[in-house]
Amino acid sequence: MTKHLITLMVFLPVLGAILQALIPKAASRWGFSLSSWVTLGASLASSICGFILVLGMRPQADLQAIESIPWVGSFAISYEMGVDGLNALLVLLIVIIFPLLIASEWNQRLGAKGMHGLLLMLQASLAGAVCAQDLFLLFFLWSLSSIPFYFLIGIWGGPERESAAFRTLVSTAVGGALLFTAMILVYYSVDPNTFSLRELAQGQLGTKTFNFFGRQISSSNVAFVLIGVGLALRAPIWPFHGWFIQAAKQAPASVFVALSAVTVPVALYIFIRVTYSLFPSTVLTSSTTIVTVGLINLIVGGICAITQKSLKSLMAYICVGQIGLALVGVGSLNAAGVVGAVFQSLLLGLGLASFGMFTGVMISRVGKAEFLDEESRPSFGGLALRAPWLAAVAAVATASLLGLPGIGGFVGNALILIGSYSVHPAALLLAGLATLLATYYLFMMYRHVFLGRMGEGVSSFSDISVWERSYLFPIVLALLIFGIYPKPWLELVRPTVLTLLSTIK
Amino acid sequence: MRELILFSPEIFMALTLGGIILSEVGYYGERSRLITATALLGLGGAFVQILLIYGLGPATAMSKVISVDGLSLFFKLLAVVLGGLSIICANASSEIGQDRRAETYALIIAGCLALSVVAGAADILLAFLALQCLNLICFGLVAFARRSSSSVEASIKHMISSAVAAGLLLFGFVILFAHTKTLNIYEMHTVLISSPLPPHAALVSLALIFLSLCFQMGAFPMHLWMPDVLQGAPTPIAGFVAVAVRLAGLAVAIRFFVVLFAQAKLSPGQWMVMGSVDWPQMMAIVSGLTMSVGALLAFRQHSAKRLLASLFVSETGFFLMGLLVLDQMGMAALLYNVGVQVFAWTGAFYVVGFLYDQLKSDHLTDLSGIMSRAAPECIFLLLCLVCIAGLPPFPGFLGQFALVGAAIRHDWYALAIVAILSRALIAIATARIGFSLVGNVTQQLAEEAMGTLPAPVAVSPGRRVFLFALLMPMVLIGVFAEVLLDWAGKSLHFILW
C-alpha cells in the first residue's frame, strides 16, 4: 500500500471524476449531494495519501517512494514517479488546496457535477505532473492540466468568459507546443534516447549540438529557452501575462485559485527541476537573465497592483509579482535563494489560495470584487465590524503575501532576499522596494474593505458561515504553521537543493 | 488451394456482399434486420480469417499479383473494422432511409473489399483498378441522400476530382511500365535498379503518381474536395468515405514508395532509385503545407462536418511526415496513428451524425448548447477530438510524438516546427467545437428555470454501448501503446521485396 501512495494520489481523483459521469443526473436533491460528496471524498482520499507520503519522507537528497513501470518501451517512456525535497512541498500544496477548493464550490448551482469533475481532473494531473520523473510523463500530465481550465473559465466565468477562455487556451497551446519541441529535442540529443529525468540528469546533454539549416546550435541552449518560454506562457511571466489578467477577471474565484495558486508554483517547480538537472551549464550562464526577468516581474506586478480596483485583478498582479520574487531566488543559484524559492512557491500558493477564497466569499456576498468604484471611492468599508472572522482570515492572507514575520510568507521572502544579495546588491534593493510597494497596495486594499466608515449596501453583510470556516480556517492554519515552525520543511528541501546546486557549480 | 486460402477474407467478403444483395430481394419488413446481422457477421468472419492468415506468413498469390504480408493484413484488419463500425453507424442514422439500408451495407462491404485488394496489390494495374473501384463506390455512397442537392453535388465533385486523379495515376504508371515492361512492382524495382529511369521521366512519373495519391489521401494541393464532399455526404457515410479513401491512398503510397523508389532495405531516408530528383524535400513541403493549410482552414469553418474535414486534411500532413522519413520508426508511427484514428474519426462522425439527426443541422451556432441535452454523446465527441488533436490523455498524443520524433531524427527540424505549430492551431480550432457544444450555460439555466429548455435527447442503451465500445480501443491503445507500435513495426518487416 505505502509503495503506491503516489499512484493512489494521482488516480483516486480520476476515479472520482469518472464516477461523476456515472452518477445519475442531478435530478433529486439526494443525487445532487451524492455526487458532491463523492467528489469531496475522492479529493480528500487523494489528499490523505499525499499527506502520508510527505510526512513519511526522510530528509535526504535522493528520490523516495519511487514507482517505475515501463510504458512505451520503444520510445523509452516509463511511468516513473517519485518525490524528493524539490517536489514534496508542491505535493503538500496540491493536497491542501484542492479539497478546500471543492468545498468552496459546494453550492455551485450551475452544472456542479461538471465543475467538480474538472477540478478532480486538475488535481490528478497537477499532482501527477509534480511527481513525474519521466520527461514525457511530466509533459503529458502538464498539458493535460491545461484542458480543464478552458472549460472551467469558458463555462463558469464572467460576462467575457469566452474570450478569456480562448486567450487562456491559445497561450497554453503555444506554451505546450514549445515544451513539446524542447522535449523531443532533448530526447533525440542524448544517446541512448531516454526520457528518464534521472538518466538525463547526469550531464548527458552536455555540449550536444544539432544542425539547423547548416548551422550547429547547442541543444541545451535551445531547449532551455523553449522550456523557459513555454512555462512562462503558463506561469504569468512578463511579457506573457496578458491572458492571465483577463482570466483573473473572468474566471470564478475558485478556478482562478487553481490557475494561480497551484499552476504557477508547479510551473516554477518544473522549471527548476528540468533546467537545473538537464542544463546545468546553461543555467549557470543565464542566471543573471533569470534574476533580471524575476525583478522586472516583481516591479511590473507591484506597480500595476497599485492601480487595481478589483480584488481579482489585484490578486493576478500579486501573483505576477510574487512569481518574480521566486524567480530571483531560482536565479540566485545559492542554497538560501533556491531553498527560499521552493519554500516560497508553497507559501505563495497558500497565500494566494487564501486570498482567492476570501475573494470568492466577497463575491458570493455582494456579487462583485471591486473594492473601489469608478471614482476610486471605497465600495465596502468597515466590514471588520460586520464580519470579524472574515477580516481575520483576510488579514492572515494579506500578511503572508506581504511576508510579515510569524506568517508563512516571511520565511520564503527572507531567504530569497538573503540569497539575492550574493547575485547583486541591486537585486536586493529592487526586491526590497517591491516589498514596500506590496505593503502599500495590500494595506490600502485592506483598509478600503475592512476599516473606515461602513459603506452603503453592506449593512446586511454576514460573517462567514460554518461551512465557509471549514475551508478557510485550514488554509490559515497552514499559513501559520509554516510561518512559525518552518524548520522541518526547510530541512526536507535543503539536501536535494544542495545536490542540484553542486552539479551546477 | 493455398492461394485461395490466402485470398479467403476477400472471398468471404464477396460472399457476404452476394448474400446481402440476395437478402435484400428476399427479406422485407421486420426480417430486414437480418441484413444488418448478415453484414456484421460477414465482416466478423473476414476479421477472424485475416487473423488466421497471419500464421501463414508473407506470401504472394494469384501469380504474384496479390501480396499477403504484414502491411496488407494490417490494412485489411483496419478496413474490416472500419466497415463494421460504419455499418453500425449507418444503421443508427436517420439520414439513410430504412428501405435503403441494405444497399448502403452492400456498398460499404464492397468498399471494404476494394480497400482490402488495394492493400494487397503488388501489381500496378490491380492497384489502379482497385483504387478506382473504391472511388466509384464512394461516389455512390456520397450521393446516398438522394433528395438532398448538396449530396448529389458532393458526389459529382468527388467524381470529377477523382477522374482527374485517376488520369494522373494512369499516366504515371504508364511511364513506369513503358520503361520497365512489367506490371509487378517487385520486378519493376529490380529493373529500375539495373537501369534507372532518365531523370525527366522519373520526375514526371513520380510527380503524377504522387499528385494522384495526394488526392486519395486528401493532401495539399489535391485536398479541396475533402470539405465539400464530407459536408454533402450523409454523415455516417462521410466518416467511411474519408477514412477509407485515405487508407487506400496510404496503403498504395507506403507499398509503392517503399518498394519502387526506395532501397531494398529500409534504411533511413534513401530514395536513391529515382536519382536526381529531391523527393524528400518536395514531400516535406507538401506535408508541411497540408498540415498548416488544414489547420488554418479549420479556423474558418462554421459547419461541424467541414471543420472535421479540415482537421482530417491537416492530419494527412502528419501522416506524410511518417512516410517521408521512410524508416522503420516513422512508418510504424504512421501505422499506429492510422490505427488509432480509425476509431477516433468514426466516433467523431458518428456523433456529428447523431447531432445532425436531432437538429437537422451541423452548423456550429445550431449546435450551441446541445451538451445539456445529450451530454454523454457530446463528451464522447470531445474525447474523440482530443484524440485527433493529439492532446493527452489519448493515444493520439503518443502518435503525434512518434511522428514528430521521426522527423527530428532525420533532421527535418523546420518541418517539425511547422508540425508542432499546426498542432497548436488544431487544438485551438478543436476547442471551438467544444465551446459551441457547451453553449451559453447561464442562458440555459435561465431557460431551465422558466421551463423553456428543450427536453433531453432520449437515452438509448444501444448508443451508449456503442460509444463505450468505440472508446475502449482508444483508451487501451494508449495504455498498451507498446503492443500496437510493435505490431505496426512488424507489419513493415514483411513487405515483400
Image (tube, coloured by chain):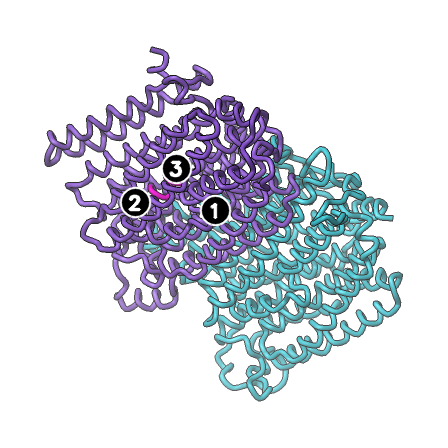
Chain colours: A cyan, B purple
- Which is more toward the observer, A266 or A352? A266
**Disc 3: CA contacts within 10 A as few (<14), some (14-19) or many (>=20):** many
Q: Are marks 2 and 3 on the same chain?
A: yes
Residue at image location 83% in from the left, 67% down from the top: A427
Q: Which dot marks residue B315?
A: 1
**Disc 2: CA contacts within 10 A as few (<14), some (14-19) or many (>=20):** many
Residue marked by disc 2: B236
Q: Is residue A50 magenta?
A: no
* Residue B168 image position (x, y, % from top left): 40, 42
* Residue A222 image position (x, y, % from top left): 72, 51
Label 3, secondary structure: give it.
Answer: helix
**A295, above or below B333, in the image:** below
Q: Which dot marks residue B418?
A: none
Q: Earlier in the sequence, mark 1 or mark 2?
A: 2
Q: Which dot marks residue B170?
A: 3
Tell me whether the residue at label 2 lies in contact with that at label 3, contact meaning CB atoms closer than 8 angstroms.
no
Chain of the residue under label 3: B
Q: Earlier in the sequence, mark 3 or mark 1?
A: 3
**Disc 1: CA contacts within 10 A as few (<14), some (14-19) or many (>=20):** many
Label 2, secondary structure: give it.
Answer: helix
Q: Is residue A117 visible?
A: yes
Region rendered in magenta = B241-248
